[in-house]
Image: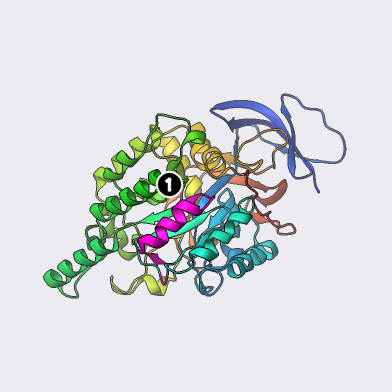
Amino acid sequence: MQQYLIRNIAVVNEGKTTVQDVWIKDSRIAKMGPSLTVSGNYEEINGEGKYLLPGVIDDQVHFREPGLTEKATIYTEARAAVAGGTTSFMEMPNTKPAALTQELLEDKYDIAQQHSLANYSFFMGVSNDNAEEVLKTNAKKDRVCGIKIFMGSSTGNMLVDNFLTLEKIFSETEMLIATHCEDEKIIRANMEAFKQEKGDHLTAADHPLIRSVEACFESSWTAVQFAKKHDSRLHILHISTAKELQLFTNMMPLAQKRITAEVCVHHLHFTSDDYKLYSNLIKCNPAIKAPENKTALWQGLLDDRLDIIATDHAPHTWTEKQQPYQQAPSGVPLVQHSLLLMLEYVKKGALSIEKVAEKMSHAPAICFRIKERGFLREGYFADCVIVDMQDKTPVAKENIYYKCGWSPFEGHTFPAAITHTFVSGHLAYANGQFNETTKGHRLHFEI
């Protein structure tokens, strides 16, 4: 494998930024320090004026394969991820067929092994009637990121509203349980009320009122009660409301928390005011809500009640998104631009670049107990990203790598650029060009 020596780069890691050299050899960071001397053949990269961050670990993406490959594939979306500085992803089970058996789960790992440019892991899915199959995943807890429950929100055949099933999973699983929390009864009642008032004239602006704050809070509160009852390891995905923040704490280090929370980039960036411009393009579940929620989410992120920044990357075709509100599917493609978006907020002074590395790299590694990734440390896998904070990245159709071919950021210019992305020591992306001769690795987890 090619060796690399990155000279004089600002290394962002574990709360500090220091100018160092970084030697990458045999998939790993071999050495870090000033003015390194190394042996053998290597490619030297001038990092002067640039930053080196640990690669982003996105704990929630939908790459659509198998069965929904007109929207995306593991190959296309992992490629887009790498172009955006995301070196590892954890993918959700609501594909077609859904990953509800051990065989179907391993099929996805087989596809990724052949085609993913990024490192990968896949969640085991839960339905109302597959609890015994789910519990078999306990034997793979060093090789599978977690169990995913669509708790109270209908997604295909994966709505889990049977409390006996929930009791069994929460009491007997030995793995992290990740939940999508929205209360389906509240959503259905809200939808019925809006239909009676507006008939078929609903729009995307109604979405955050139908999939309301109360729908999110009630379901998240229920999940927390199950976790506390059984001392389960619970991770609630895509928190979108101010009210839910009362369910989480910042009174202990992340590694000691049994209940953790994720916030997604679109909930940190957009508000309900943006439906006027974007309409169904930003329709997602849980919904992007009123501005006061965005303000509270930023506060919760900065004070560590919210632990991880992710995307919930969920591509749909342009044609699907142009349908009327009720027919248009929910989901937004984001994984290529999540790091750039957060770096824009660094430029705005909303958070530090060290906080970006913490919430997008360190925290996912800690929360999921990922082995030897998420930090820039000697001996760890060389998952890292070179960023130029003086450059710009315009978003246009020709440089959008999602299979769906569109982004809500099209026409926007980010005030930073990702120049190089290393995946397990392999230079997978450099200055707009991909090197696909080596694939990503399956993630492994501490037991």
- Residue 418 position, x and y percent, is 57, 46
Against 103, residue 39 (above or below) is above
Residue tagged by mark 1? 230
Q: Which residues are magenta?
A: 156-177
For this view, does 201 lie left or right of residue 162?
left
- Residue 178 position, x and y percent, is 46, 52
388, 208: nearer the viewer: 208
Against 82, residue 154 (above or below) is below
For this view, does 52 lie left or right of residue 397?
right
- Residue 338 position, x and y percent, is 48, 49
Q: Secondary structure at mark 1?
A: helix
Q: Residue furthest left?
A: 197
- Residue under the point 46% across and 40% down: 258
How many discs appear? 1
Against 254, residue 244 (above or below) is below
- Residue 341 position, x and y percent, is 45, 46
Quadrant holding the C terminus: top right
